[in-house]
Image: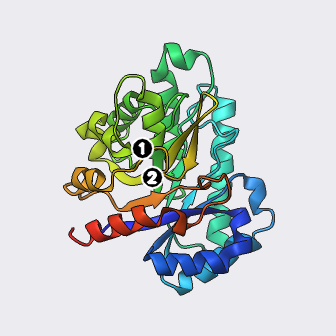
């Protein structure tokens, strides 16, 4: 059974009643809590509020670990190990707070110049990070990212070879932006056509959000007003993948640039929910 979820972050706690009402109305059964920074957990009352409210409605919880200044694929041991320590500290805090989460997403990034010349060094560093973090939890999911080593599709394939039981989060919008110059997509779901069978068989979670083209720049985490999702195409492509467990709308802004809420993408949620009933 695939769960349909929505992302929230710390500032959303001020409107948790409204969001909870929309979760129930839209038939969402999963939430992904985005921790922007470990500094967000200095005061953890907000995450406890999320836990208490969503758990009371049997809405499962996933966690997105911080990515700013976190370089788990750095070939420099000092940087990699410092990044690992932050992720591990977050896991320890979640454990102390008794947060029952289904997974935690990490970004496989590095910004060292050598990564563009010899990415295997960075991917081997990422392998060490994954193995070290797994001493604390088996619920790690590695996300595809754009513009940096080591989260592009070819990097993900190498990681899967090095760590055979790796779980992957495919972010369709990140892939769309990374490869759009090479392909002519009619919707976001089309990007799955360039994802190898090797990656698809390891895909545990898919992030769904649109891309806006503003002032010659691509802005992600938007609704689907400019870039349609393609619900039917998405369903057809994942219906044979028994390993996919979550589809999460990582939509933080609507077409007006304001904080988004599930009703802003009601059409996409409703159609996907209807299609998933046939699985």
Mark 2 — residue?
A: 208
Image location (x, y in percent) of residue 267: 41, 64
Q: Which of 169 and 189 is in front in this view?
A: 189
Q: Is mark 1 on a helix, strand or loop?
A: helix
Report the quarter where the C terminus lies: bottom left
Q: Residue furthest bottom?
A: 56
Task: Say the numbered circle drawn on residue 172.
Answer: 1
Mark before the other along the chain sequence, 1 or 2: 1
Pinpoint residue 18: horizontal percent, then vertical percent: 64, 78
Depth order, front residue of 52/215: 215
**Circles 1 and 2: CB atoms closer than 8 Å:** yes
Q: Which residue lies furthest to the top in this view?
A: 117
- Where is residue 177? Give x, y as percent: 48, 33
Task: Give the alpha-carbon distance from disc 1 to disc 2, as whole Å.
Answer: 6 Å
The residue carrying pointer 2 sits among few (fewer than 14), some (14 to 19) or many (20 or more) residues within 10 Å by Cα, namely many
Q: Quadrant of residue 162?
A: top left
Left or right of 205: which side holds 256? right
Please state if 111 lies on the left or on the right of 170 as rendered.
right
């Amino acid at each position: 059974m695939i769960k349909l979820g929505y992302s929230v972050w710390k500032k959303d706690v001020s409107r948790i009643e409204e969001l909870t009402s929309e979760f129930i109305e839209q038939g969402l059964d999963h939430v992904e809590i985005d921790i922007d920074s470990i500094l967000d957990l200095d005061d953890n009352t907000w995450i406890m509020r999320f836990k208490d409210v969503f758990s009371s409605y049997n809405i499962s919880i996933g966690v997105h670990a911080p990515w700013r200044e976190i370089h788990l694929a750095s070939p420099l041991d000092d940087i990699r190990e410092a990044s690992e320590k932050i992720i591990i500290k977050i896991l320890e805090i979640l454990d102390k707070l008794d947060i029952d989460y289904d997974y935690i997403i990490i970004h496989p990034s590095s910004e060292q110049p050598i990564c563009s010349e010899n990415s295997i060094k960075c991917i081997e560093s990422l392998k060490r990070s994954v193995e070290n973090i797994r001493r604390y939890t088996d619920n790690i999911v590695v996300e595809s990212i754009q513009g940096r080593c080591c989260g592009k599709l070819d990097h993900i394939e190498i990681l899967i070879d090095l760590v055979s039981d790796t779980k992957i989060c495919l972010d369709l919008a990140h892939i769309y932006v990374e490869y759009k110059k090479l392909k002519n997509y009619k919707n976001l779901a089309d990007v799955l056509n360039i994802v190898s069978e090797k990656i698809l068989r390891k895909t545990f979670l898919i992030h769904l959000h649109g891309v806006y083209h503003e002032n010659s720049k691509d802005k992600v985490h938007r609704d689907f007003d400019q870039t349609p999702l393609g619900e039917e195409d998405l369903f057809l492509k994942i219906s044979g993948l028994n390993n996919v467990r979550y589809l999460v709308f990582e939509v933080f802004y609507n077409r007006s640039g304001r904080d988004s809420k599930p009703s802003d993408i009601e059409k996409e949620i409703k159609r996907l929910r209807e299609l998933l009933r046939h699985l």
